[in-house]
Image (tube, helix red, strand yellow):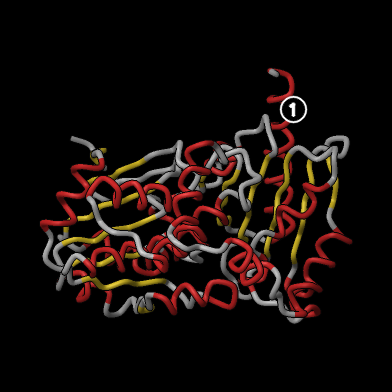
Amino acid sequence: MPKPELINADAVISQLMSADGIVITTHARADGDAIGCVAALTRVLRNQGKTVSAFLHESAGRRYGFLAEIEPAAIWDPSSAGRVLDGAELLVIVDTCARAQLGDVTDAIEMSPIAKLAIDHHRTRDDIVDTAMIDEGAGACAQLIAELCDRAGWPVDRQTAELLFVGLATDTGWFRFSNTDGRALTAAARFVEAGVRPNELYERLYLDEPVPRARLIGAALSGFELHVDDRLAVIRLTREMMVSCGATPEMTEDLINEPQRVGSVIAAVLLVEPVDDGPVRVSFRSKRLVDVAAVAARFGGGGHARAAGARIEGPMDGVAERVVKAMTTALRTAESLS
């Protein structure tokens, strides 16, 4: 049977409850959904008496640091990752099932004989795990964790609800993206009933920006390009722009959404030049029509139909030219078929 074998919630619960020693992790450059799911699932399983170790690839950063304070996670050290995995029975990867998103511990994960399970809501999946529960219809992976808790009868206290609400709210653009449906709003209501205060979380997440982040937003808004009769917006963040603003890579999160304020814009691309010789980080978004996951897949990336990403080797200008050409073709093709 080809991997990953797709399994249902009952099979996931059985696998989690039968494991003695669980490692939970997620993708590199973890966002609110990824960090919230790692912390929430760790918290829930520990409350069930399980021995759980949680790992992120880097610090949670300024925006999401408070999530890590609720349920701290260690940072992966590639040199010891193999030993960590060999000392457990089950690896759980949340919010991704893509090899390219597992950073410097990809080799250790692939080489380890440990059982591997993914819980994810993205379209892109690889054979990095043995089993997976995939629900592309979920607005966030946090919904899947909440539904597992309901199915298993695991209590969700206020702090766990906060972790899951942040995951759901950030992945749905605070409930304004097209993945916001009745199921997502029902989950949000359930978290609020558990004690979550959305206004306080919104202030903590989005109304506490450092000055360099505000300057970076200004640079992005003042310099973005428009293509295809103003229907495709392109932001290029160069090393020089980052330095002049005093910004760090984590401050680029959500910047791709800014030019979508323009009424004519249907799709957007954000390119971030690496500070070293690494790949250019590219984010893709669309309001409608364009399946950006399909475009990202052409460059070795993936994601959702309306939100995707890729890491592309090459000089910034060359990568930008290739990406703009691909998005232009995708946009014009989608419009011709609509």
Q: Is residue 36 left or right of residue 290?
A: left
Relative to 94, is 140 on the left or the right? Answer: right
**47 vs 250, nearest the viewer:** 47
Q: Determine which quarter of the picture holds residue 178.
A: top right
Quadrant assignment, res 100? bottom left
Q: Of residues 7 and 252, which is closer to you in this image?
A: 7
Q: Write the residue at 66% across / 69% down.
A: 203
Residue type at the position of mark 1: Arg
User: In the rendered view, would you say 30 is above or below 5?
Assistant: below
Q: Residue 128: percent from the left, percent from the top? A: 30, 52
Q: State whether residue 285 is above or below residue 57.
A: above
For mark 1, what is the residue? 332
Question: Which residue is more in the foreground, 64 or 162?
Answer: 162
What is the count of numbered marks? 1
Q: Position of residue 294 (x, y in %)?
A: 55, 36
> Which residue is at a point 83% across and 36% down the rendered structure image?
228
Residue 70: image x %, image y %?
41, 76
Residue 47 percent location from the top left of the image: 23, 68
Secondary element at tag 1: helix
- In this rendering, the answer to whether 16 lies above or below 264 is below
- Residue 134 position by quadrant: top left
Residue at horizontal 24 percent and vertical 64 percent from the top: 45
The quarter of the image holding the C terminus is top right
Q: Nearer the viewer, residue 315 or 267?
A: 267
The image shows residue 123, relative to residue 88, as above or below, that is: above
Q: Quadrant of the N terminus?
A: top left
Mark 1 crowdedness (10 Å alpha carbons): few <14, some 14-19, many ≥20: some
**Who's the residue at 51% across and 53% down the image?**
168
